[in-house]
């Protein structure tokens, strides 16, 4: 495994809209994902965790309520590798399944208790 050269990286990033490149630590990409609520965000993280574990390539991430921020980099090459771009593609596929899920709302319903 080796670090992606700048030309290959640019071509692959063009196929991953939403991911931001940062030269920090030799190169990394970051994307923020927004969901309907915490449960959806956590479900997304669970699916990504299973994919990452299967590939033995783990993201750096954080979750605040309905937002998940993911950073990918390959520590062994001190930058971005093909593993990062492949995982970004899979993460985007997982996210696309959540975007097609209708957001359920209890607003305006008398039979559902909502917090004040």
Image (cartoon, grey):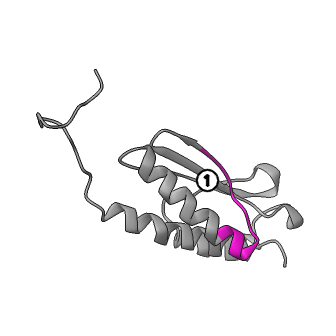
Res. 100 image quadrant: bottom left
Horizontally, residue 7 falls left or right of residue 65, namely: right
At x 54% / y 65%, what residue is drawn?
A: 47
Q: Is residue 56 magenta?
A: yes
* Residue 64 in magenta stretch: no
- Left or right, residue 67 beside residue 102: right
What residue is at 80 percent from the left and 62 percent from the top?
79
Most foreground residue, 12 or 33 = 33
Is residue 7 visible in this depiction of the protein?
no
90 and 111: which is toward the camera? 111
Is any part of residue 111 visible from this angle? yes
Residue 45 vs 112, above or below: the answer is below
Q: Position of residue 35 (x, y in %)?
A: 40, 50
> Which quadrant of the figure has residue 55?
bottom right
From which residue to which does the magenta span run? Answer: 52-62
Q: Position of residue 108 (x, y in %)?
A: 12, 35
Image spot of residue 105 (x, y percent): 22, 44
Q: Is residue 13 left or right of residue 79?
A: left
List the residue tagged with mark 1: 70
């Amino acid at each position: 495994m080796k670090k992606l050269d700048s030309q290959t990286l640019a071509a692959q990033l063009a196929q991953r809209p939403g991911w931001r490149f940062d030269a920090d630590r030799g190169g990394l990409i970051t994307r923020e994902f927004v969901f309907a609520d915490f449960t959806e965000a956590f479900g997304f993280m669970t699916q990504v965790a299973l994919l990452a574990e299967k590939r033995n390539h783990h993201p750096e991430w954080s979750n605040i309520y309905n937002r998940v921020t993911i950073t990918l980099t390959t520590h062994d090459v001190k930058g971005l590798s093909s593993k990062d771009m492949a995982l970004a593609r899979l993460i985007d596929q997982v996210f696309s399944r959540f975007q097609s899920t209708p957001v359920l709302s209890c607003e305006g319903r008398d039979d559902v208790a909502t917090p004040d």
